[in-house]
Amino acid sequence: MKAGLYETLERKHGDAAKSYVAQLFAKGDDAMLKKIGEEATETVLAAKSGDRLALVREIADLWFHSMIVLARHGLGPADVLAEMHRREGISGLDEKAGRKK
């Protein structure tokens, strides 16, 4: 049975020579955040191109790298889902206006 996707992030403790996740953790925050920027840009380009398969692949990359950053901060997908559930039924404009600055 395959491990859950988020659980693969436990590879952060692994050998950086054998694990991409461990490599990113070893390189630090700047490398992780750079990957999110790169993947976000690639997502935008894929969406503009109209290539549905490329869009799905780029969003998968973006989500994966986002999960790496969440894990770096001791958070996980459940934290993001809880926030999304909190916002359910609230106007996006109202939700944004109600955020503490």
Image (cartoon, helix red, strand yellow):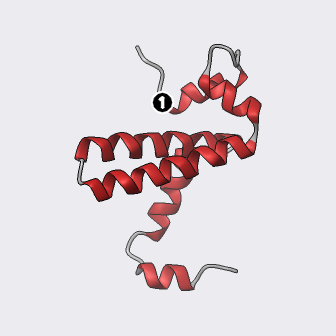
Residue 46: x and y, percent?
33, 51
79 lies above or below 21: below
Q: Is residue 42 left or right of residue 73?
A: left
Q: Residue at x 46, y 70 (%)?
A: 87
Q: Is residue 11 left or right of residue 82?
A: right
Residue 13: x and y, percent?
72, 22
Which part of the image, by quadrant, shows the N terminus? top left
Q: Is residue 73 shown to the viewer in this render?
A: no
Q: Which residue is mark 1?
A: 5
50 lies above or below 7: below
Q: Secondary structure at mark 1?
A: loop
Q: Is residue 60 shown to the viewer in this render?
A: yes
Q: Residue at x 73, y 46 (%)?
A: 30
Q: How many marks?
A: 1
**Residue 75 or residue 52, whichever sits in front:** 52
Residue 9: x and y, percent?
60, 29
